[in-house]
Image (cartoon, grey):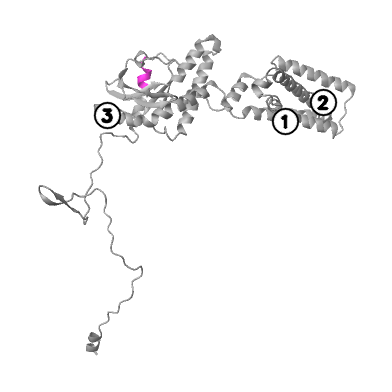
Amino acid sequence: MRDECVVPRPRGYAPAVCSVVLGLLLLVLISLLDSSLIREASGLIAFPLILGAVLHCLCLLTEEWVFHSQQRYGGSVKQMLRACFSSSTLAGLCVVFLALVVGGVTYTPKQWTQVVLTCALYLLLKTLGVLGPAPVEISEVCESRKMNVAHGLAWSFYVGYLKLVLPELEKQVRKHYSETGEVLSSVRLHILLPLSAAATTRLEEVDRNVLFHQNLPELQLDRAGVRRRVYKHSIYKITDQNKEDYYCVAEYATPVLTLYQMSQDSYAGFSASDRRQQVLLFYTTLRHILETSLECRNRYRLILLDDEQAEPHYLSRELIKTLQQQEQEIPMDLTRELPRSVAEEGTYRAPVWDQHNGLQEEPPSSLPSLMISGPSPLRSLPVENTDYTQNNAHR
């Protein structure tokens, strides 16, 4: 399944850019109609809006101060102010205060009435949710601040499971080969993520071409007070249309089952659309975590499954496609032996004594020998070698 078809990309700054452009166009239009109106009415409109936002923050502070000061903030007034007042609201309040005090801006009683009326309407509209954030804004805040359910599940799955078993997976595969002589089609762990979050107990229930073969040797680790906790993986046999068999280690990502069970519980308030969105977010978060992990690199494959379609053999098709893609990479052949060492010419072989055959020559070493000559000065002295008798004979 192609990731770019269903996996959402991070949200950008298009809404902010559109808002700024639209606001500037409206200001230009008003300035063309009546330029003096901007100078007169801009302050009268901005002041009550900012004041209404400050009053709303004060209402939030009242709730936190009266009911949650000790439990949530430990009695710290500074933390409560930071939680209720944003930096942009305080900056706007400072601008209004400087305009009124330093700038000498004054309002008539009628204008003050408009200010109070605007503040009252702002508080009512804000409380009723008319000025509240849209669902897409809430989703953007949760994604940018890593506050979704999927973020916590992805980190828990990585820290509590994948970070422990993936570095040891190759050893378990080699141990399986030494015990059974079977060579797998891939030594990586294939993690299945269905969009519906319906992780069945057995893969055979989803696709009859995927059959359980056997388990890898168990991995035992001391974890969270449990001595020799057991971790193990299952090997599955996948049969294609040509009756060719593939063997690989595959399993569902267990946190998606949590998302499915949450959607089945009315108390969780988790709809089917929310579940699908969280599965995609879990996939993108887990992929980012594993790509930046040195311990897990090149030891896994994430397979996103569109299991909502009616095709009966979609699971075997996706697994075989992934295995065939890995065949194009550099394979890891467990049966391949290391090349034998070749004796170098001129290598000294020390004699060894044998009780039966006497003195024999030592077999050649696989390590290269280091030839060290005797000590000599770094700079050789000149040697006089002129033959004077031969020179005199020529004379």
Q: In the structure shown, which secondary structural element does the residue marked by tag 2 occupy?
A: helix
Disc 2/disc 1 C-alpha distance (Å): 18 Å
Residue 152 in the image, given as x and y percentages of width and height: 52, 23
Give the mark, 2 or 1, whose residue is nearer the N terminus.
Answer: 1
Q: Quadrant of residue 173?
A: top left
Which residues are drawn in magenta? 312-318
Q: Which residue is mark 2?
A: 44
**Which secondary structure is most common in the magenta stretch?**
helix
Is residue 314 highlighted in magenta?
yes
Disc 1/disc 3 C-alpha distance (Å): 69 Å
Give the foreground label among 3 and 2: 3
Q: Horizontally, is 309 left or right of 128 in the view?
A: left
Answer whether residue 275 is visible to the viewer in this image. yes
Q: In the structure shown, which secondary structural element does the residue marked by tag 1 occupy?
A: helix
Residue drawn 30% across the image and 31% down it: 174
Q: Residue furthest left?
A: 356
Q: Is residue 286 above or below residue 199?
A: below
Disc 3/disc 2 C-alpha distance (Å): 80 Å
Give the mark, 3 or 2, whose residue is nearer the N terminus.
Answer: 2
Residue 128 in the image, given as x and y percentages of width and height: 71, 14
- Quadrant of image for the N terminus: top left
* Image disc number at residue 24: 1
Q: Horizontally, is 224 left or right of 219 in the view?
A: right
Kind of residue at badge 3: Tyr
Residue drawn 51% across the image and 16% down it: 275
Give the mark, 1 or 3, whose residue is nearer the N terminus.
Answer: 1
